[in-house]
Amino acid sequence: MAALEEPLVAPKPAVDTDVLASIDPQSLEDGYIYVHCHYADAQRDMLIRIWRTTYLFDQHSNARAHLVHAENISYAPVWTWIPDNKPFRFLLIFTSLPKSCTVFDLIEQIPQPGGFEVRNIHRNERDVYHVPI
């Protein structure tokens, strides 16, 4: 029987998510979509990560926005540790969706069960969202 390998765990990044949440998107002219994710940890020694194959899908067209940056969460295969029973926040930044998009889904497409999915996110003019994961 092969020995189980310890998962790679990144140290918790030093990011002040309150500062990130307070950025006024109207001062930014980049056309990105900002998704602030809130994860309520109900388990002990929870590990979390995001795959680069996470997208925003327009529900009414074939358009999708690509993940371009993540704050306060590591990219797979590295894991980020969440302290026991502590809420955890991270920021995902995506390319833009067409102006005609009114509702979209956040879907982490991964080759195993358990990918993040948040459906029916209603578009707003600021393109800044807060979603529970």
Image (spheres, rainbow, N blue to C red):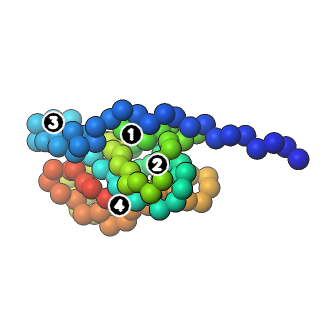
Whether residue 53 sits left or right of residue 126 in the image: it is right
* Quarter of the image where one finds residue 26: top left
What residue is pinned by disc 1? 72
x then y, percent, for residue 123: 22, 59
Whole-Å distance between the Cαs marked 2 and 3?
33 Å
Q: Considering depth in this image, is 35 or 123 the residue closer to the camera?
A: 35
Mark 1 vs 2: CB contact within 8 A: no
Does dot 2 land on a helix, a strand or a loop? loop
Q: Which residue is drawn at 39% across and 44% down?
A: 66
Q: Which residue is drawn at 17% across and 43% down?
A: 22
What residue is pinned by disc 3? 28
Q: What residue type is labelled 1?
A: Asn
Q: Which residue is drawn at 68% across and 40% down?
A: 6
Answer with mark 4 or mark 2, whichever residue precedes in sequence. Answer: 2
Does dot 1 land on a helix, a strand or a loop? loop
Mark 2 vs 3: CB contact within 8 A: no
Q: Specify the label residue 83 is tagged with.
A: 2
Q: Which amino acid does label 4 sit on?
A: Pro
Mark 3 vs 4: CB contact within 8 A: no
Answer with mark 1 or mark 2, whichever residue precedes in sequence. Answer: 1
- Quadrant placement of the C terminus: bottom left
The label nearer to you, 3 versus 4, is 4
Whole-Å distance between the Cαs marked 4 and 2?
18 Å
Q: Specify the label residue 132 is tagged with.
A: 4
Q: Is residue 88 above or below residue 28?
A: below
Tell me if mark 4 has few (under 14), some (14-19) or many (20+) residues whose alpha carbon lies within 10 angstroms of its own: few
Answer with mark 3 or mark 4, whichever residue precedes in sequence. Answer: 3
The label nearer to you, 4 versus 2, is 2
Does dot 4 land on a helix, a strand or a loop? strand
The label nearer to you, 1 versus 2, is 2
